[in-house]
Image (tube, rainbow, N blue to C red):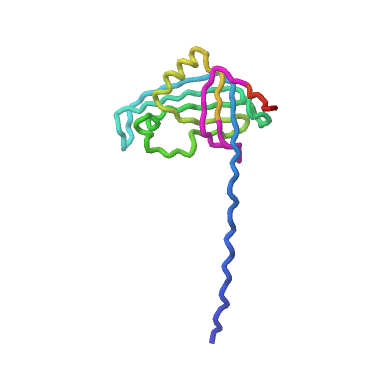
Amino acid sequence: MAENPKPRLKKAKRRRRALHLEFQEYVIAVKTWDWSYSLSLDTSRHRSEPYHEFRQLVIKGRLLKPTGLITDQVEVTLLPDRNLDAECRRNHEPVFVGSLELYDNKMVGLIPIPMDALTPILAMLIGDRFKFLAMSGTQLYRRSTRLTGFSLEMTMEEEEPSGE
């Protein structure tokens, strides 16, 4: 007769350590920008309207904060998105608002924006008023980060050291 095999002990499951997220600010001095627009017939199978419209705003500049990264060249693309308009976004539960990634010798970002925000942003860039793009997000991890917020600024105030 065959003996009953010994029961195997289950290995204890290894707990993953909780990822400790550190947040930091990314500040870019705006050097140049480029806007592109296209309109075409929407020939996709599941179209909702007869046209396909594409707009993108690319902001290029130099990374001021944080220092010490392998590059200081930054290119952030702002993409207008109808899903971010006031009526559509009510039921959103976003985790982040955009992302930054390091590629070769450049930091590249992608941030969707509401469609109606494009016009005033373009007006301020045409008037050479926006000088800085400030973004907040997690520290770079594996050459990328998730952004929790961003703003275009005319001036940047230096933080005063709290030495009371």
Q: Is residue 102 left or right of residue 34?
A: right
Is 146 in the magenta? yes
The spot of residue 79 in percent (x, y) is: 45, 28
Q: Is residue 127 above or below residue 100?
A: above
Q: Is residue 13 left or right of residue 51?
A: right
Q: Which residue is more in the foreground, 95 or 32?
A: 95
Q: Residue furthest right?
A: 163
Which quadrant does the C terminus fall into? top right
Q: How many marks?
A: 0
Q: Is residue 13 above or below residue 98?
A: below
Is 43 in the magenta? no
Specify start and end residues of the magenta stretch as a single range: 136-157
Q: Quadrant of residue 25?
A: top right
The spot of residue 151 in percent (x, y) is: 51, 25
Q: Which residue is more in the foreground, 129 or 4?
A: 129
Q: Residue at x 53, y 17 (%)?
A: 130
The spot of residue 38 in percent (x, y) is: 40, 23
Q: Quadrant of residue 107?
A: top right
Q: Residue at x 45, y 15 (%)?
A: 123
Q: Residue at x 48, y 34 (%)?
A: 97
Q: Is residue 34 left or right of residue 24?
A: left
Q: Which residue is more in the foreground, 164 or 3?
A: 164
